[in-house]
Amino acid sequence: MPDFHAVIVGAGFAGLYMLHRLRQLGLSARLFEAGDGVGGTWYWNRYPGARCDVESMDYSYSFSDELQQEWKWSERYASQPEILTYINHVADRFDLRRDIRLATRVTAATFDEAARWWTVTTDRGDRVSARFCIMATGCLSTAQVPNFPGRQSFRGATYHTGRWPHEGVDFTGQRVGVIGTGSSAIQSIPIIAAEAAHLFVFQRTPNFSVPARNAPLDPDFERQVKTCYADFRRQARESRVGFVVERSEGSALAVTADERRREYEKRWNRGGLGFTATYVDLLTDKDANDTAAEFCRERIRAAVRDPEVADLLAPKDYPVGTKRMCVDTGYYETFNRDNVTLVDIRRAPIEAITPDGLRTREAEYALDSIVFATGFDAMTGALLSIDVRGR
């Protein structure tokens, strides 16, 4: 007989819920987690400004009504520390830790066709068998660091936003380079810019970003949701995006330009990811999408004083919403600071990391620290790092 009914890999939101659910079914399980604590994404991603872009009343477990009624979020969008506090509370409240092995990385999983179970091995010498092997490794969990020539020669400090030092980083007085302008860069750049002597942002592809309009959680809204949480969760499950958003069934092309602008303004001023749900055809009709994309570009131009910088920050070669929009606080306005320089690496790509900084095809940049906001080996990265054999 196998040691357990199931082995779970990963102690993020999905892994912890899977452990809880298996117990409810009367099944035994062992969960392995590579980190020193539970939390998954929210354990590893501790960069400045790390915050969820889904609203707090949505971004939480729904399996326990007692939990969702009792837990109180402090802000409309929860910060990384608050989410990590929440998930640790869940681990304690439901006594999950006794079946979790932290600081233990699964290295291989082999299926025995004859015995019909998995043998799972770890970097700490564990060798356990289970009928089921459940990968809760996340789709954005394996950090991607470009292999630039000379990367190992850099004499300063390097960081990846997805593997941020737990003790934090002080950039005061430094020349800092951030490579990338995706979600983690858009959240961290305004904060790093406020600390650094000078910040260089190396951008290949600009992103559409909508203001968060974050604020303390409205007590009336919290009460409203908690009064009918079951229906709120139903709406989220039936939504195409997985959370509750005000959705229109009208076409962007069926209204006047003035009416369309008023709707876009309303969504922009509310903030958050509901912008692409302003009209039903924004993601299915290019002409409709063009109206939303141009509105976003107008807002970027209004926020950024230098027309050339604004033009570089405004996406033009893909429709808005076809890449997940980002949610920011003061991102575009940060490029009005005298100590922030935007570098276009689509025009002049990075050629090498040097001992003293970074070299593009057009110039050299002296840096004290480099932040790789370069994303993840998405979807399969964590899975392919495990030697999986069998089916």
Image (spheres, rainbow, N blue to C red):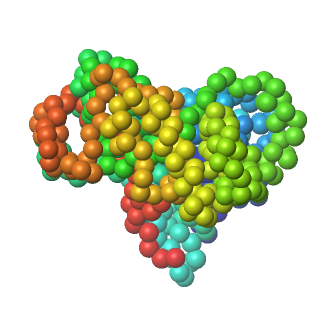
Instruction: Say left or right for 207 vs 366.
Output: right
Horizontal side of 146 relative to 22 (left or right) equals left
Q: Name the spot of residue 140 as percent of width and height, x first.
A: 47, 52
Which quadrant: the N terminus? Answer: bottom right
Q: Position of residue 175 (x, y in %)?
A: 23, 26
* Number of on-image labels: 0
Q: Position of residue 263 (x, y in %)?
A: 69, 43
**Where 103 falls versus 384 (above or below)?**
above
Residue situated in front as seen by the camera: 127 or 361:
361
Is there any visible trace of residue 307 in the rendered image?
yes
Q: Can you give x and y, in whole percent of width and height, for residue 118 in the image? A: 53, 69
Q: Quadrant of residue 160?
A: top left
Q: In this rendering, would 49 be left or right of 24?
A: left
The image quarter in which residue 381 lies: bottom left
Which residue is at a point 88% across and 35% down the rendered structure image? 227
Left or right relative to 15: residue 72: right
